[in-house]
Image (spheres, grey):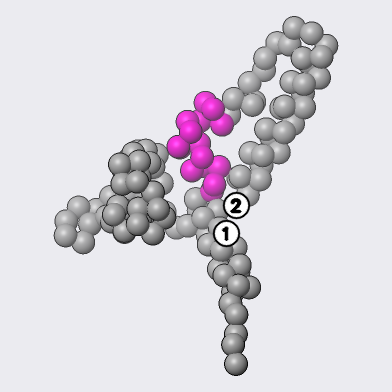
């Protein structure tokens, strides 16, 4: 799809979307195609792209993986909080690694089917 089509459908400013797509292209998530029918398309099948991978690409792996870093706590209280934070980050990353773009589309389609109203 072309940037202006995506921007219009998703109500995202063109300039911001350009930056996101450039980052996703550098990360190997999407690829760009030039020409009159040019635009952006997924670089791989949607069932092979995880939400974690997209987040890591957009936010930077260092921010996503930061929860795995060992920080030396200075107090017992901060040690307890650090352990809980590590557990929460690992759980969040685990969930994000489980879902793919295809999963998101399936969930969206299922919800849209629930919202269909039949009139007689």
Q: Is residue 93 rendered to the left or right of residue 88?
A: left
The image quarter containing residue 95 is top right
Q: Which mark is residue 103?
A: 1
Q: Secondary structure at mark 1?
A: helix
Marks 1 and 2 close (CB-CB < 8 Å): yes
What residue sits 60% from the left and 72% below the top? 115
The secondary structure making up most of the magenta span is helix
When the figure is inspected, residue 109 is found, relative to residue 104, above or below; the finding is below
Q: Which residue is mark 2?
A: 99
Asked whether residue 33 appears in the rendered view, the answer is yes
What residue sits 24% from the left and 53% below the top? 33
What residue sits 59% from the left and 25% below the top? 66
Residue 50 on image: x %, y %: 54, 48
- Number of labels in the image equals 2
The image quarter containing residue 2 is bottom left
Magenta span? 50-64
């Amino acid at each position: 799809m072309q940037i202006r089509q995506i921007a219009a459908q998703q109500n995202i400013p063109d300039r911001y979307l350009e930056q996101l797509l450039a980052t996703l292209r550098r990360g190997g998530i999407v690829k760009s195609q030039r020409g009159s029918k040019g635009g952006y398309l997924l670089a791989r099948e949607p069932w092979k792209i995880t939400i974690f991978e997209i987040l890591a690409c957009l936010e930077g792996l260092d921010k996503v993986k930061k929860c795995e870093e060992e920080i030396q706590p200075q107090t017992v209280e901060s040690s307890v909080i650090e352990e809980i934070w590590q557990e929460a980050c690992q759980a969040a990353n685990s969930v994000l690694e489980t879902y793919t773009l295809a999963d998101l589309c399936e969930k969206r389609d299922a919800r849209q089917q629930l919202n269909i109203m039949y009139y007689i």
